[in-house]
């Protein structure tokens, strides 16, 4: 598209001013390098938080009861609030804000588990089948509790991997019976939690309905784990929490503002707020990174202005000999784009490469079991971001060379020959 002579002249000019070209290019390379590092680090923090939230469904909510602290409708404070099976029916059929529900009836933590001559005390969680998805319970072997287990009050249990090791050693526990208290339960599955949640490996899951019948629970429910509708703002998530609280307050005759009567925690609210923070951080990173890049681009523009000043006579002679304004503009503009693009691309490759190297180190640490609690995951820059950065480089180079090239194009032969 352009004459080969132009490129030869550009490279000749660069060779004559190696140090100046290097320092100019370094400022651009450093700007794009820092942009990639900042974006990669932001992604790493964001991904780390998402992994933490992924331990449960992001729209999960827990509800539990206590004692009233505010008099209400003629009733004194200090009254105990109790959930029941009727509340489960209400939440699953009447509450429009709730999608899935699991009840829990607490059992003592010192219930003895025994198999043969082996025994130990472990946590027993009573639940519905929906808890598996809500708390992302990983089944290593066998299956989780199902609806048939619930309807038929089956004495079945899913044990954590630590319970398997303590009671069964190397023996396959599936289909075997263990005693929980004095009641035999058939082992139908083994759950395995991630290493940062090792306590969950010491927990067992039994059907809620079975627990109520065997352990004299009546229709008592201690807590509910539910999933709400997915919404886009923390205000909408809080509105769901408040609506459910008002419904339960009406059913149990307590003031909706009484936090001690019923406690709740909505994961969705925290998730949305946290993601909003990271969106703001990402925007801030772009502003800082582009600001650093602009500083480098200004340096390129200044250098090109100096170059035009130094070659004023040469440009005047060119124009006197018939050079068109376009040829003068292209000479300056192409040199600016070349310096900016090459230097910026080097910074881009180094920044992306550094983030990939950090990610490789984290993956190796995770594979060896040493990075389970690291709040930093996959700190890489995606392809679309790299493409966007490349386009920014090219446009920045053109912008950096525009003013100097326009000044060069406006030089008249007479003015140029008078210039000292």
Image (tube, rainbow, N blue to C red):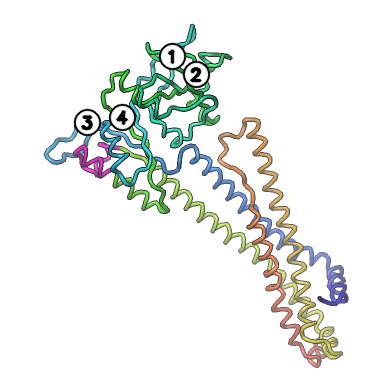
264 sits to left or right of 398: left
Name the element at disc 3. Answer: loop
Magenta run includes residue 258: yes
**Which one is closest to the eye, mark 4 or mark 3?**
4
129 sits to left or right of 164: left
Placement of 172 over or under 413, stated as above or below: above
Placement of 128 over or under 13, stated as above or below: above
Between the residue at mark 2 and the residue at mark 3, the CA separation in whole angstroms equals 35 Å
Between the residue at mark 2 and the residue at mark 4, the CA separation in whole angstroms equals 25 Å
Q: Residue lying furthest left in this view?
A: 74
**Which one is closest to the eye, mark 3 or mark 1?**
1
Question: What span is in magenta?
Answer: 245-262
Residue under circle 4? Answer: 222
- Residue 113, numbered circle: 1
Magenta run includes residue 67: no
Residue under circle 3? Answer: 80
Question: Which of pointers 1 and 2 lies earlier in the amino acid sequence?
Answer: 1
Name the element at disc 2. Answer: helix
Question: Which quarter of the figure is the N terminus placed in?
Answer: bottom right
Q: Residues within 10 Å of mark 2 (few under 14, many from 20)?
A: many
Residue at 70% x, 57% y: name it.
Answer: 348
Residue under circle 2? Answer: 163
- Residue 414, numbered circle: none
Who is closer to the viewer here, 10 or 247? 247
């Amino acid at each position: 598209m352009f004459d080969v002579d132009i490129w030869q002249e550009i490279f000749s000019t660069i060779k004559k001013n190696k140090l100046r070209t290097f320092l100019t290019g370094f400022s651009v390379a450093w700007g794009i390098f820092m942009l990639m590092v900042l974006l990669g680090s932001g992604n790493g923090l964001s991904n780390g938080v998402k992994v933490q939230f992924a331990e449960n469904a992001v729209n999960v909510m827990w509800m539990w009861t206590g004692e009233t602290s505010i008099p209400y409708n003629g009733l004194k404070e200090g009254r105990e609030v109790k959930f029941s099976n009727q509340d489960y029916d209400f939440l699953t059929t009447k509450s429009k804000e709730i999608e899935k529900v699991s009840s829990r009836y607490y059992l003592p933590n010192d219930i003895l588990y025994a198999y043969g001559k082996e025994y130990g005390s472990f946590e027993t969680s009573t639940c519905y089948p929906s808890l598996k998805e809500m708390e992302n319970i990983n089944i290593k072997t066998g299956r989780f509790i199902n609806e048939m287990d619930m309807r038929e009050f089956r004495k079945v249990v899913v044990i954590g991997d630590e319970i398997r090791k303590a009671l069964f050693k190397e023996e396959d526990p599936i289909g075997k019976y263990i005693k929980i208290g004095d009641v035999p339960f058939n082992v139908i599955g083994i759950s395995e939690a991630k290493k940062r949640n090792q306590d969950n490996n010491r927990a067992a899951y039994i059907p809620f309905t079975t627990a109520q019948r065997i352990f004299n629970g009546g229709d008592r429910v201690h807590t509910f784990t539910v999933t709400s509708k997915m919404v886009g703002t923390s205000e909408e998530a809080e509105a769901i929490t408040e609506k459910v609280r008002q419904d339960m307050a009406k059913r149990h005759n307590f003031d909706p503002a009484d936090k001690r009567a019923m406690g709740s925690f909505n994961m969705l609210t925290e998730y949305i707020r946290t993601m909003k923070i990271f969106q703001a951080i990402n925007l801030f990173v772009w502003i800082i990174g582009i600001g650093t890049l602009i500083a480098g681009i200004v340096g390129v523009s200044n250098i090109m202005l100096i170059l035009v000043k130094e070659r004023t006579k040469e440009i005047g002679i060119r124009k006197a000999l018939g050079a068109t304004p376009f040829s003068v503009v292209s000479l300056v503009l192409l040199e600016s784009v070349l310096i900016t693009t090459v230097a910026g691309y080097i910074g881009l490759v180094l920044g992306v490469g550094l983030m990939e190297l950090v990610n490789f180190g984290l993956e190796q640490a995770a594979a060896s079991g040493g990075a389970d609690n690291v709040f930093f995951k996959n700190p890489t820059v995606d392809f679309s971001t790299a493409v966007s950065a490349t386009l920014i480089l090219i446009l920045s180079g053109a912008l950096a060379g525009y003013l100097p090239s326009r000044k060069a194009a406006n030089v008249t032969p007479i003015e140029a020959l008078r210039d000292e």
